[in-house]
Image: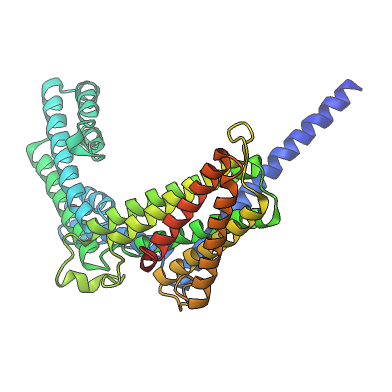
Amino acid sequence: MTRVINGTGSDKATTGRLARAVDAVRWETQSVGRAARAAVRGPGRERDLLIQSLKAALAALLAWLVAQVWLNDPMALMAPWVALVLVQATVYSSLVTGARQFAAICIGALVASGAQAVTDDTTGALALSVPVLVLLSNWPRFGDQGIYAATTAVFTIASGTVSVEAVGHRLGQAALGAVIGVAVNALILPPVHLRDVRENLAALAREAGEVLSAVAGDLRDGEWDAQTAVGRLNAAKRLQDRLDALRSARGWSRESLRLTSGALRKLHRAPTEALPTEDEDERLGRITGHVTALTRSLAVAADEERSPASPDPEVLGSYGKLLELLGDSCRAEADRLLGEEEPGDPLLDERTEAAMRDLHSALQGGLTKEAGQGAARTAVLGTLVLQAENLWADLNPQARGR
């Protein structure tokens, strides 16, 4: 009986693992399908990756044709190898990477040749040169290209050809591959990472709006408690990840525009004239900070151990209406950044702005009412009103000073 039970348990465990494996394969397949459809559908990150991959393959093929077919060089393998890895995310990074890689290859070939000359033995040459070159690969000047010094040494020694002529062939082919790789990346649809800036800005505004709308719904429905508040605070904190992605995208956009001015700029596949200014990054960053601070204050207000008295539910309901309007404004901001047809910014519409002013007056009245019930209630509600005003000011600069 025991054996049957154990067997059944083992079968269930195996079935469970198979089911998880099938689900993982299905998920990966669906991800590939979504990426393929996105690449076909229109410009975007997926299409950019497809183009860069095809360019890398083209650079390797061209380098092979020039080195092997045209020049008939016996060391032709080096050219496509170098060309393949030099089709980088930007033209500038291709040049920097190419210089570092070529330096690493030169050092690797020279050290390997010297080790072979000293030891006159393949194993001895590997033992003498590879540890030194692997250690040298950690030198910051090499960036992430230092490992090519060690791999070049391995190829050089393993091929058994370490003469001056052979080393010269390898270095020449490395230089040829570098030239072809950089040229393909610079002249054929040079990568200009401007779309990522716009998409991250819009996503940051939209996600901030979603957090505000979710908080507003909880406050209106009276479902606000400590657990809910912590969940919304965690959602607001995740906005920081999107803000970090925006800053990274802005850095890539600056780098992608280096060395692509003039005639090369005409070949890029993303518009440069409509790129949002860096002031937009700062403004959205402030909005993110306001949303996080606001949800943190609400979490403190809902925590009975930290706040002696939370604001009146009716006042919180009015506050929820105000947050809903602010969330709508964030979503309208996202649409504007993506260049979509604007349905009208709620904060610029006269009727909506009047409604926000009425809500603000109601909150001010609630603040006066709370003042008679103790300093703790007044402090919490005053903090919430101040943070909403700060958020409103950054979403609608015209509202400042009113």
Q: Is residue 402 placed above or below 108 in the rendered structure?
A: below
Taking the image as shown, residue 198 lies to the left or right of residue 372, namely left
Res. 74 visible in picture: no
Where does the N terminus fall, quadrant-wise? top right
Q: Nearer the viewer, residue 276 or 196?
A: 276
Colour logic = rainbow
Front one among 59 and 392: 392
| Rendering coords of residue 51 (x, y %) | 35, 64
In the foreground, 353 or 68: 353
Count of number-bearing discs: 0
Residue furthest to the front: 372
Residue sitting at 49 percent across and 46 percent down?
Answer: 383
Determine which quarter of the picture holds residue 196.
bottom left
User: Does residue 7 appear to the left or right of 205 in the view shown?
Assistant: right
Q: In this view, does 258 lie to the left or right of 236?
A: left
Q: In which quarter of the image is residue 183?
A: bottom left
**Image coordinates for residue 59, horizontal then vertical, percent:** 26, 60
Residue 231's place in the image compared with 50, above or below, is above
The outermost residue toward the right is 1
Q: Position of residue 49 (x, y in %)?
A: 38, 60
| Residue at the extreme left of the image, as rendered | 164
Q: Can residue 357 be seen in this view?
A: yes
Name the residue at 60% across, 52% down.
Answer: 27
Which quarter of the figure is the C terminus placed in?
bottom left
* Residue at image coords 54%, 39%: 375
